[in-house]
Image (cartoon, grey):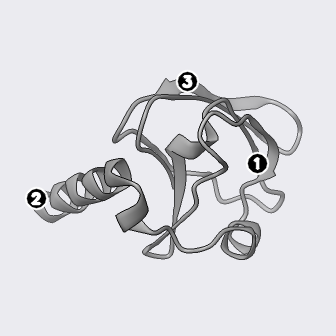
Amino acid sequence: MMIAVRPAWVRVRAADGSVIYEAIMNAGDTFKLPATEDPATLRVGESGAIYFAVNGRTYGPAGSRGQVTKNLALSVGHLTTAYELADIARDSDLERVVAELNGAALTE
């Protein structure tokens, strides 16, 4: 799942190139990535605002603040090897969003 901690424009393309998600994600917005044989790819205009939740752990960010990231393969294997576990202490926005998402999950 992609998690935005600050506003960021994102575009997710399926392996065939078709756009399956495009939006300006705001803090707290999430997008559940499709489980497909060939991974989707991500382009993001504010890489420092996008993290990835994989198997109950948070990885990222997708890149540095203000950086554009292109053609990022959104597979579990790639995300968990290309990125380190997110350090919540280094990004107060991530800390807040994760706490809000965990609180929402508990009330559902």
Badge count: 3
Would you say 108 lies left or right of 51 here?
left
Tag 3, which secondary structure? strand
Q: Mark 1 near mark 3, Cβ–Cβ under 8 Å?
A: no
Q: Which mark is residue 107?
A: 2
Q: Farthest residue toward the front?
A: 90
Residue 78 in the image, given as x and y percentages of width and height: 76, 68
Packing grade of label 1 (10 A; few <14, some 14-19, many >=20) is: many
- The correct choice, above or below, for 12 with respect to 82 in the image is above
Does residue 98 appear to the left or right of 12 in the view shown? Answer: left
Above or below 28: residue 98: below
Q: Name the kind of residue labelled 1 in the image.
A: Ala
Looking at the image, the residue that sits furthest to the left is 107
Mark sitting earlier along the chain (1/3)? 3
The amino acid type, in three-letter code, at marker 2 is: Thr
Pointer 3 and pointer 2: residues touching (CB < 8 Å)?
A: no
Residue at coordinates 70% horizontally, 37% vertically from top-left?
Answer: 67
Instruction: Tell me which amino acid carries mark 3.
Output: Ala
Q: Position of residue 2 (x, y in %)?
A: 53, 50
Q: Is there a contact, CB below 8 Å, between mark 1 and mark 2?
A: no
Rounded to the nearest angstrom, the CA distance separating label 1 from label 2 is 31 Å
Check disc 1 and report the residue beneath it.
40
How many residues crowd mark 2 within 10 Å: few (<14), some (14–19), many (20+)? few
Secondary structure type for disc 2:
helix
- Distance between the Cα atoms at labels 3 and 2? 27 Å
Horizontal placement of 33 versus 68: left or right? left
| Residue that badge 3 annotates | 23
> Residue 30 falls in which quadrant of the image?
top left
